[in-house]
Image: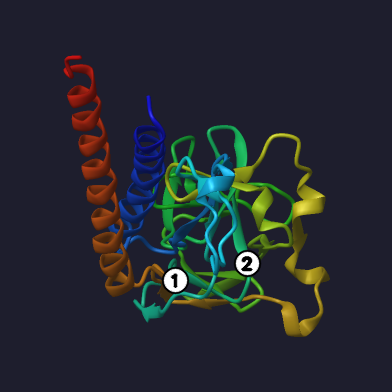
Amino acid sequence: MNNSMISSAVSMAGIQQRLDLLADNIANVNTVGYKSKGATFEDTLTSIVKQEAGMGRTGRATPLGINVGYGSRMTSVSRDYSQGPIKDTGNDTDLAIQGNGLFAVQANGQKAWTREGDFHIQPDPKDNKLAYLVTNQGYYVLDKNNAPITVPAGSKLQIDAHGNIKATLGKTTTNLGQSIQLVSPQRPEALEQRADNLFVLTAGANENDVLASNDTLPQSQQASLRQGALEQSNVDLTTEMSEMLQVQRAYQLSARALTSSDTMTNLANNLRG
């Protein structure tokens, strides 16, 4: 293949990945606690084709060489952890994180983290007097001792800004002695997104190096909880749609370049001496 064909094909592959990220952001514009994704691109291999000395002319300012590129590729995916808007719901099991923090959950036997705070109370099938605090997908919410949070079945919860839980059943209010585990990402690049709006550690990462307990941070850096509210997605739909239009135009341009290159190759192959 010639240079223009290679450049177009490589660029189309990278642009398609960017379109996939934009589509993912737009699809999650109403997902509670979702953090938008971005991408970083760089040039692929670039070479310089030198021209013959005869190409030089008096007064020419440019060097005798042509930079030949081979398109661009996506090198990394970044995530915007900025605070999303908070919406009041009045539901006592809805929690919004204000600041840099994540909930700890147990998902399929593995510890994971999320910003999604639309929790529910799920009855314990083995004990009708107990219930678990779970995520919208049914994952156990963990306390500071990494144990699933249990509450009296049918109770109303009172959760303060630090995650301490009180349960009211009838006219009796009890301090459960459990606190919702809240951690702060210190190395967010070591977190990998999975399905159900969850984050897990990347291969080889250590939890203590990546996440810090909220209680160990200075007061000014600590996150807090707001009961009866949910953090909305921080995706800006207007920005995402505008960028999608630009990226689609870039894809079309690369596709036309690829078609033109193919046409010229066919013309060259059909030439008769």
- Say if 24 sits above or below 57 in the image: above
Seen at 75% across and 85% down, the residue is 220
Seen at 55% across and 69% down, the residue is 59
Closest to the observer, 141 or 204: 204
Q: Residues within 10 Å of mark 1 (few under 14, many from 20)?
A: few
- Say if 268 sits above or below 118 in the image: above
Seen at 71% across and 77% down, the residue is 222
Asked if residue 213 shows in the view, the reply is: yes
Dividing the picture into quadrants, the one containing residue 161 is bottom right
**Of the image marks 2 and 1, the number of the one nearer the N terminus:** 2
Query: In the image, residue 70 lies at what x, y percent?
Result: 47, 40
Asked if residue 46 shows in the view, the reply is: no
Query: In the image, residue 60 lies at what x, y percent?
Result: 54, 65
Q: Amino acid at mark 1?
A: Gly
Task: Kindly give the residue lying farthest to the top in the view shown.
Answer: 273
Dividing the picture into quadrants, the one containing residue 47 is top right
Seen at 40% across and 33% down, the residue is 6
Can you identify the residue that label 1 sits on? 170
For label 1, the SS is loop
Cβ atoms under marks 2 and 1 closer than 8 Å: no
Task: Residue 233: give its label.
Answer: none
Closest to the observer, 245 or 232: 245
Can you identify the residue that label 2 sits on? 101
For the residues marked 2 and 1, what is the alpha-carbon distance in whole angstroms?
33 Å
From the image, which quarter does the N terminus lie in? top left
Query: In the image, residue 144 lies at what x, y percent?
Result: 72, 57
Query: In the image, residue 96 lies at what x, y percent?
Result: 49, 72
